[in-house]
């Protein structure tokens, strides 16, 4: 017979039946587990906050605070505790609901000591796997942060210096410098610039994945960010003869997010809309609030090349770039849209794409809004935004 998995953390039993508490304590202590028992939910939860047990055994049907209420409060504590519920035959359906709420398993009454030990052994194994996975995630995040620091200092600085040297060389070249030589240096400058863009985007992506970018949760107004973003990209738009249109209405409720992260998201979307537009095209930024799901949807639309249906599912993948005859020669790293997607998801939102080849694309970002604010023209629905 295999030895049951051991655990340093205690097992807590919450049950209003004293006989059941004694039976659980005796069966589990015989196997070597630390066991504490409590007659009601409040006293058990108080102890859980103090010791963070590995496993909780809780009866679903108790006077006062029910087992389901205990589960709900335990989940709010954000512990790794594995929950096993005790249920009578008539409440097996409730046990299934408890598992949907976060319980790992259930044991119906009456049960033997061996049945209890078998289920708890599985729960303890689950606890070990969960805590080990958490440890590995923390270690991965630590290594990622170390690598980010390495990349930042060991790659960005020398590449930036090389580009500066090339800038000086180009500036000092006289009229008698061979055209081919000037062209090679210029190409080298542009390639190094692209490498620096890739490094910067990769660092940003790593920060998002590590939860280091969208860290704030404040009320942010799209109106202000859109004005600043469009002003900052006006020169790029003029170079392509692209018109920037701001159709974000006044009085739009604020969204809940991180201002610097949202500024980056919006700048990426507008910059892409300019780059992949046709000469003389338009970029339109619009927004609409919804009282149905308490969100604000902001769209960035262009009149550019559009994206073929078979390529659309891949646009949010890292390093993926849309390929067609119209996009050849357009610079980019293929990480702008993945960054936008991760920022939106980190802020409990989403980003979607609607596109038609030859007619342009619309990216829509939906984020939670401030529920206290209302708009005069709010109708409760978020219509299709944008359009050029």
Image: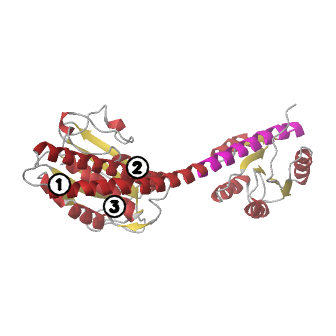
Q: Position of residue 157 (x, y in %)?
A: 37, 57
Between 271 and 244, the one nearer to me in the picture:
271
Whether 325 is drawn above or below 120: the answer is above
Image quarter where the N terminus lies is: top right
Colour logic: secondary structure
User: Which residue position is annotated with label 2?
Assistant: 202
Q: Is residue 120 magenta?
A: yes
Residue 295 in sight = yes
Magenta region, residue range: 109-138
* Residue for badge 3: 263
Magenta region includes residue 21: no
The reply to whether residue 384 is in sight is no
Depicted 348 relative to depicted 118: above or below: below
State the image coordinates of residue 187 (x, y, percent, origin top left): 21, 45
Question: Quick check: 67 left or right of 306?
Answer: right
Q: Secondary structure at mark 1?
A: helix
Question: Which disc number belongs to residue 170?
Answer: 1
* Mark nearer the viewer, 1 or 3: 1
Q: CA distance from mark 2 to mark 3?
A: 17 Å
In depth, the one of 343 and 23 nearer the eye is: 343
| Left or right, residue 365 beside residue 73 | left
Q: Position of residue 111 (x, y in %)?
A: 86, 39
- Name the residue: 18% across, 46% down: 277
Q: CA distance from mark 1 to mark 3?
A: 34 Å
Magenta part, dominant SS? helix
Q: Earlier in the sequence, mark 1 or mark 3?
A: 1
| Label 3, residues with CA under 10 Å away: few <14, some 14-19, many ≥20 | some
Q: Earlier in the sequence, mark 2 or mark 1?
A: 1
Callouts 1 and 3 close, C-beta under 8 Å: no
Q: Residue furthest left?
A: 175
């Amino acid at each position: 017979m295999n030895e049951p998995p051991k655990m340093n953390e205690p097992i807590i039993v919450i049950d209003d039946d004293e006989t059941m508490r004694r039976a659980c304590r005796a069966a589990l202590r015989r196997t070597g587990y630390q066991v504490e028992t409590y007659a009601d939910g409040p006293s058990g939860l108080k102890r859980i906050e103090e010791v963070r047990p590995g496993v909780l055994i809780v009866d679903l049907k108790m006077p006062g605070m029910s087992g389901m209420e205990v589960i709900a409060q335990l989940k709010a504590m954000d512990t790794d505790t594995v929950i096993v519920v005790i249920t009578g035959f008539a409440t097996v359906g409730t046990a299934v609901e408890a598992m949907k709420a976060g319980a790992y398993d259930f044991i119906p009454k009456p049960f033997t000591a061996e049945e209890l030990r078998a289920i708890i052994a599985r729960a303890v194994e689950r606890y070990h796997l969960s805590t080990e996975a958490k440890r590995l995630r923390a270690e991965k995040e630590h290594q990622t942060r170390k690598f980010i620091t390495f990349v930042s200092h060991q790659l960005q600085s020398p590449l930036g210096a090389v580009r500066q040297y090339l800038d000086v060389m180009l500036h000092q070249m006289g009229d008698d410098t061979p055209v081919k030589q000037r062209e090679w240096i210029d190409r080298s400058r542009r390639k190094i610039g692209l490498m620096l863009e890739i490094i910067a985007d990769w660092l940003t992506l790593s920060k998002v994945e590590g939860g280091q970018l969208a860290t704030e949760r404040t009320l942010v107004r799209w109106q202000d960010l859109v004005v600043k973003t469009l002003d900052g990209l006006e020169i790029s738009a003029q170079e392509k003869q692209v018109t920037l249109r701001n159709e974000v209405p006044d009085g739009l409720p604020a969204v809940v997010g991180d201002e610097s992260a949202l500024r980056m998201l919006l700048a990426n979307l507008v910059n892409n809309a300019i780059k992949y537009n046709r000469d003389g095209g338009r970029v339109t930024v619009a927004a609409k609030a919804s009282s149905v799901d308490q969100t604000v949807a902001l769209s960035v639309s262009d009149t550019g090349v559009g994206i073929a249906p078979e390529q659309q599912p891949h646009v949010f993948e890292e390093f993926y770039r849309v390929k067609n005859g119209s996009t050849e020669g357009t610079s980019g790293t293929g990480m702008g849209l993945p960054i936008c997607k991760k920022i939106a998801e980190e802020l409990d939102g989403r980003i979607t794409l609607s596109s038609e080849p030859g007619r342009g694309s619309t990216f829509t970002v939906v984020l939670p809004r401030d529920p206290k604010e209302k708009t005069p023209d709010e109708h409760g629905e978020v219509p299709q935004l944008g359009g050029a």
